[in-house]
Image (spheres, rainbow, N blue to C red):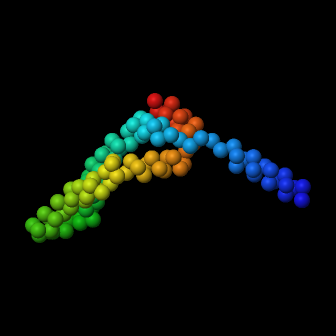
Amino acid sequence: MKKFLFALAIAALAGGARAAPASAESIERLLTLTRTEALLDTMYASSDQMMRQSMRQTLGTRALTAEQQRVIDELPAKFVATMRQDFNWATLKPHYMRIYQETFEQEEIDGLNAFYG
């Protein structure tokens, strides 16, 4: 019984010693310092290039009709345009904010800001 009460007391103390959650301002600073929005733009450009290269490798030396070639040529740009529309910074930023707030405490965000700053 003593062991149970001791374990309960330790658990209560550990639960009460919770650190402060990260503030929205400090997370926004981190996202700015790490250039998260710019990384998305880089990802879009890379996606276009990777799709084109992958399709070339997949098709190999196969002969395509003019219509098939037109579709193949237009597809990467259409895909990236859809990504930009559906996964733009205005849409993704609230998710980043929530994930960072749920994952990190203020002290950790402060440390990351100091490192990247």
Residue 43 position, x and y percent, is: 33, 49
Residue 10 position, x and y percent, is: 78, 49
Q: Residue at x 48, y 50 (%)?
A: 99
Front in this rendered view, residue 112 or 97: 97
Taking the image as shown, residue 85 lies to the left or right of residue 104, namely left
Q: Is residue 102 above or below residue 113?
A: below
Q: Is residue 33 visible?
A: yes
Q: Residue at x 45, y 37 (%)?
A: 25
Residue 6 position, x and y percent, is: 84, 52
Front in this rendered view, residue 31 or 116: 31
Image-quadrant location for residue 31? top left
Q: Residue furthest right?
A: 2
Q: Is residue 64 above or below residue 51?
A: below
Taking the image as shown, residue 13 lies to the left or right of residue 88, namely right
Front in this rendered view, residue 52 or 42: 42
Q: Residue at x 70, y 46 (%)?
A: 16
